[in-house]
Amino acid sequence: FLAAEALRLGLEPERITIVGDRPEDLERALSEGFTADLCLVSGGLGPTHDDRTVEMVARVAGRALVLDDGLEQEIEGVSRMVAERMGRQYSEFATGVTKQATLPEGALSLGLAGTAPGFVLDTGGSAIVVVLPGPPRELRRLWPRALETPPVRRVLEQAPERGRAVLRFFGTPESAVARALAEAGGDGNGVEATICAREFEIHVDLIFDPEAGERAAAIAQALRGGLERYLFSEDSRSVAEIVLDLCRARGFTLGAAESCTGGLVAARLTEIGGSSDVFRGSVVAYANDVKESELGVSGELLERHGAVSAEVAQAMARGVRERLSADVGVAVTGIAGPEGGTEEKPVGLVLLHVVGPDGEKARRIELPGDRETVRGRATAAALHLVRKLMENRHTTG
């Protein structure tokens, strides 16, 4: 997220470093980061002994640690509410509250998004340091506040003005996108092109200088022309956001029936604010008897075809649509592994089905990777199948 935001703002990320909690590792990583114009740090702001980010930022910047009284009161208020909900004594939280309210001298607090504050520090050298909580929801909430602080605004004012074009593809291999990009002229001459593969999606970013705008537009148009069938986004929206927008535009609601994904489809949809006007819910029907009782899948169908079959996926989609009174129902069933596969139905086999007012679509795919990878890719594929039904496109891949 932070790297994408930096690109959007005209900054070029030089390095992304993932580091553990050992002080010497943190100090080394921060010392390197402080040589940049803008150093973005996330995580390690909690109340425990191994949350050392604030301490190490202060050490590397040569600043003392100072208790912020106003911040302490704010964190105390949140912590007292948490203690009350958990039925615990506030005294158990007090030491952590003081720790979290202690910042490097001269730091600008960004306030809270949980109990951990973000802050901005002008080191007095080359770097402006932005420190944010690790949890994505909290990080995203405090990031806009960081952009409004004078130190960060000074950095952004000095950033070269650059344009950005985004193209996202699904259903085509990374090699095909790379080939199309090379045939379109590739990067260089004021255009920097990057390709990132993510859960069967291929993301292309074109970052270009103002004078290279026409060249970037020509590259983007060539990619559209050669890969139009697979193009699904040019505005950085995720497939989950697109599905919600498509349903919203038609006044449709959506329900999901999940087996091997175990609620991941629901998670992808509900992490987007405002999704409740479209998404009715998800039935995680892992066991066969739950498929019968909660989705209305017949025992005879399960016995004849097995839980991982096109017929059962269809019945699950139709069942969740009826049970949740949704306009559109999508179902996922499969074998995520590492056990459970057969020659006929190998590990990685996933059956998808979506049904709605526009008709039905089905897909059978065999996904490579470990259990987590298969589940993530199956989730993405399910959302894309809904998108294709809503857009009335032919299924690819």
Image (cartoon, grey):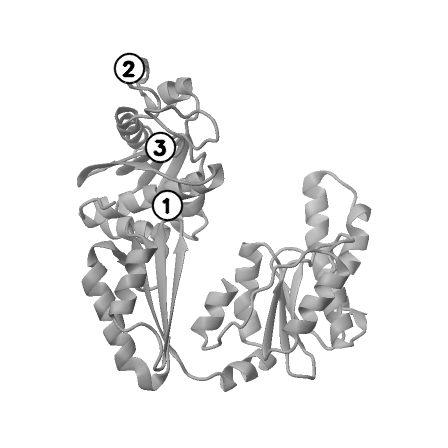
SS assignment at label 1: helix
Give the side of residue 104 with respect to residue 195, left or right. Answer: right
Residue beneath the point at 47% across and 26% down: 339
Q: Which residue is mark 2?
A: 304
Q: Residue 380 — which label?
A: 1
User: Distance between the Cα atoms at labels 3 and 2?
Assistant: 18 Å
Mark-to-mark CA distance, 1 and 3: 14 Å
Q: CA distance from mark 2 to mark 1?
A: 28 Å
Left or right: residue 101 compared with residue 201? right
Image x and y of residue 382, in percent = 33, 41
Q: Position of residue 172 (x, y in %)?
A: 28, 52
Q: Earlier in the sequence, mark 3 or mark 2?
A: 2
Q: Amino acid at mark 3?
A: Leu
Helix, strand or loop at mark 2 = helix
Quarter of the image where one finds residue 128: bottom right
Callouts 2 and 1 close, C-beta under 8 Å:
no
Q: What percent of the width, then of the height, locates residue 141?
A: 54, 61
Q: Nearer the viewer, mark 1 or mark 3?
A: 3
Sequence-wise first label, 1 or 3: 3
Would you name the residue on which mark 3 appears? Answer: 349
For image coordinates 72% across by 62% down, the residue present is: 25
Residue at (44% x, 37% y) in the render = 263
Left or right of 71, for residue 227: left
